[in-house]
Amino acid sequence: MTELLASVRLLDLFLRRNILMQLVDQLMCKEFQFRLKPQQAILEKAILYTRKLFWVFLSLSALDILVHVVVVPGLGKFSNLPLKMDLIWFDISQESYFTFVYIYQVSYKPMVLGTFMALQTLPWAAMCCAISQLNVLIYNLENIKYLVELTMAEMQCDSNTAFKEVFKGCILHHCSIVRFVNTIQNAFGGQLTSTLWLNGCIVGTTAVQIFSIESPLNNITDVAWILAYLFIMIGYLFVDCYFGNSVTIKTSIKRCLITELACIKRGFLLSMDRAFNTSEERLTGIYSKNTAAYCYNCCEIRASLSGDFY
């Protein structure tokens, strides 16, 4: 099953390689670059979190490899192969083939699981980047007065001009996030949908398999391995849902902050509300949500940001 999932995901990424390159280019755009320490700290925290997530799952895979390739065969004095092989036209139990096949399996399993972990955590890393950018946008909206003061000092301009620049930057930043999230959907939506379907089937069949074990008390090892595998599959689904739910929560917080800015007059709020474009936005093929898109173009931004704001 692991080999099948890894092969399908590699094929899918190969076919979508142009979209994947667009995702990298959008991640390096100027709207995602910040120079204030709090903003950089938010992005660095997301990078560290993604790295920890990858190393945790890679460590669990290494433990699985150690048990299946070294411990279990060692208990049988390495008389059996670590993995079962079907549809083989030669007798793998012969000494001339056994050593070669055993070495092949020892090198093959770490490579497959390492590749699978990289493919599994790649969409999570992309969604974590989107969440960190939403956190930066929330920080900018919460501290918009401070950013206006910094802009006034740098540009030597009045408060209205500084506010226009800061708020325009927030709108452009949000549009970049929307574009980035849509690209994530195009790049990984099919993978996440297939993973949800396959993991759901695996969880169901694995749970049923527990009841098929005769004398569970006499086969504690089999029960433990099935429960561990079931826990891993549920963990994959939990992480997918966690990232999707985080984006939904951050989006709702951001909308409240925009509509409740104390420094904006009611007239501007009315014109801004008329500019809202409510749309159905999908983070992936799994998680759909209704959000306010706030999709302005530059002309609409300039038209809306006219007049006094303080």
Image (tube, rainbow, N blue to C red):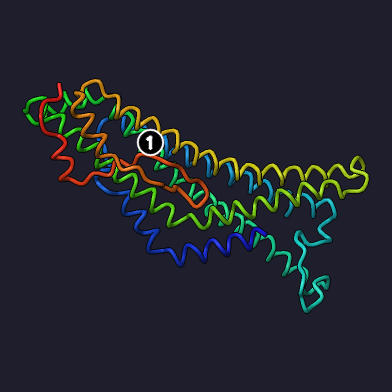
Q: Residue at x 68, y 66 (%)?
A: 104
Q: Quadrant of the N terminus?
A: bottom right
The part of the image, by quadrant, that contains residue 107 is bottom right
Q: Nearer the viewer, residue 286 or 154?
A: 286
Q: x, y (%) of residue 59? A: 61, 44
Q: x, y (%) of residue 149? A: 16, 23
Tell me: 86 left or right of 191: right
Q: x, y (%) of residue 257? A: 32, 27
Q: Does residue 153 appear in this view?
A: no
Q: x, y (%) of residue 12? A: 50, 64
Name the residue carrying label 1: 44
Q: Residue at x 13, y 40 (%)?
A: 302
Q: Amino acid at mark 1?
A: Glu
Tell me: 224 left or right of 282: right
Q: Residue at x 39, y 42 (%)?
A: 130
Q: Nearer the viewer, residue 229 or 194?
A: 194
Q: Does residue 207 appear in this view?
A: yes
Q: Nearer the viewer, residue 255 or 216?
A: 255
Q: Is 252 above or below relative to 58?
A: above
Label 1 Cα neighbours within 10 Å, binned few <14 / some 14-19 / many ≥20: few
Residue farthest toward the bottom in the current orientation of the protein = 89
Q: Quadrant of the C terminus?
A: top left
Q: Residue at x 53, y 38 (%)?
A: 242
Q: Is 247 above or below relative to 203?
A: above
The part of the image, by quadrant, that contains residue 15 is bottom left
